[in-house]
Image: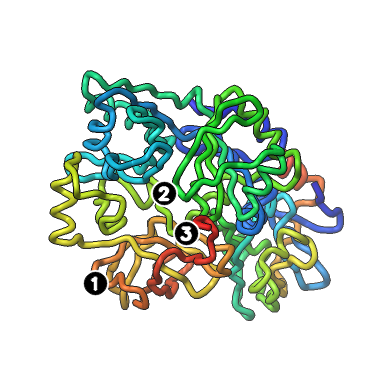
Amino acid sequence: MTLKTPLHEEHQHLGARMAPFGGWDMPIQYAGILAEHAWTRSHASIFDTCHMGEFELSGPTAAADLEKLLTQQIGGMAEGACRYGYLLREDGGVLDDLTCYRLGPERFMLVVNAATTSADADWIQAHLSAQTTFHDISSQTGKLDIQGPNSRRAIEEVLQMPLPDLSYFSAREVEIANVTCLVSRSGYTGEWGYEIYLPAQETVRFWKMFLAGGAIRTAGLGARDTLRLEMGYPLYGHELSVDRSPVAASRGRFISLEKTFIGREAVENDLRKGVSHYLAGLRLAGRRAARAGDRVLAQGVEAGVVTSGSFAPSLGTAVAMAYIKNDLCRPGTQLEIATRGGTLPAEVVSLPFYKKGTARG
Amino acid sequence: MNIPENLRYTKTHEWVRIEGDTATVGITEFAQEQLGDLTFVELPAVGRAVTAGEETAVVESVKAASDIYAPLPGTVTEVNQALNEHPELINTDPYDKGWIFRIKLSDKADQSVLLDAAQYAEIAGGN
């Protein structure tokens, strides 16, 4: 079965090219990936991200349960704060990467990947105290991402009202067009922008409202992928999986060791001993792209594997993310990638690939 | 869908313009639309001998790579160098500025294997 977001018909009316993603029939592109990518970096784009999953957890034990389930620190999160981290198995395998919002003293929202929503829900519910209430609110929650350096001005113009000043990775409930929305200053593009959560039945009306002014244009999952890749952001199923340690992905970032959590022992062990391969960025010399699964070589000897790769529109060359042997992942290291079209030279570079993003303001 | 009458076509979505013993090859408007924005073109070496159906060039979009086949046997005499810096010419002008390579046809080249515009329209429309 392929799931459809509330905007499915809108995408078809706009002539979007649709393809399955994470169990959903999603728009890959409208005008074209390169144009949508460029418009997001320079103006503002709207993305249908209704496929993502949302869970609401509440109750006197919710904070303590989340502390145990997630790698990010929950204690100390102010109301409206948002933190990114991992959901781990006991052995440290990554079940998902997710953001956690504190909506009230005893109320939280988790935002998870589409393909993992159902497995996450099962895992989380199996680890909750009796006094914590869990609701999978995915189907009743719409999500629109508006991203790009002009997004604040463009939204304010469309709505004829000011948006609150929000610091990066914080959110607030805002009354928009008679609907209470959660507006979060965050995203997956590296540009200043918002993730807006709203009742699913309002999604079509809001989508049309945001597009009406012409300053905000549609962008699909194709551009979403090239934008996130240029920022070195991981995509679950590519850079992250149950077979990879979160230490290999982010070297201890997004993990708080000031608390206990499921998978902590494995994480500590990996931090102490180091792991064989780490996630790193590779910049290729030309436009030809390496793709997920391509082997990384050091003077012909096996050195790792590509997890994502594409032409990077903002850079004019191809880039890739890869798990690379720990002694070969320092920036400046010269490697090769064995692609279907031949062996391509690549240099390890620091992330993000694209350093002019406006996300943090 | 633009499928010029004066060109010949292949089932694999190449177009062919035959002038004397030379064939100019590109990909159709339908093909470029299916591929999306092109970001890289690998051109064949000039002087390379190719057989009909041989993988002769590669075009890459943001998402995928696709082979371009020689429609007829011959020798590559010229390639469109502009595509090295501007692969998007295939998207914007597939039948003219977006041409990919030229072949001097061998004596054995059998042009009857190529499709005419009407035959190709059925394939492009039927996809």
Which residue does the image show at 75% across and 42% down from the upper left?
Answer: A213
Task: Find the distance from the CA under tag 3 to the CA under tag 2.
Answer: 11 Å
CB under 8 Å between callouts 1 and 2?
Answer: no
Residue at image coords 50%, 41%: A184
| Residue occupied by mark 3 | A231
Q: Position of B87 compared to B120: left or right?
A: left
Q: Secondary structure beneath disc 2?
A: loop
Query: In the depicted view, which residue is nearer to us: A180 or A354?
Result: A180
Above or below A72: residue A344: below
Mark 3 against mark 2, which lies toward the viewer? Answer: 3
Relative depth, front residue between A4 and B45? A4
Three-letter code, disc 3:
Met
Q: Residue at x 81, y 50 (%)?
A: B2
Question: Which tag, 1 or 3, sits closer to the chain's start?
Answer: 3
Q: Residue under circle 1?
A: A327
Indicate which disc residue B105 carries. none
Chain name for mark 2: A
Residue occupied by mark 2: A235
Left or right, residue A53 beside residue B52: left
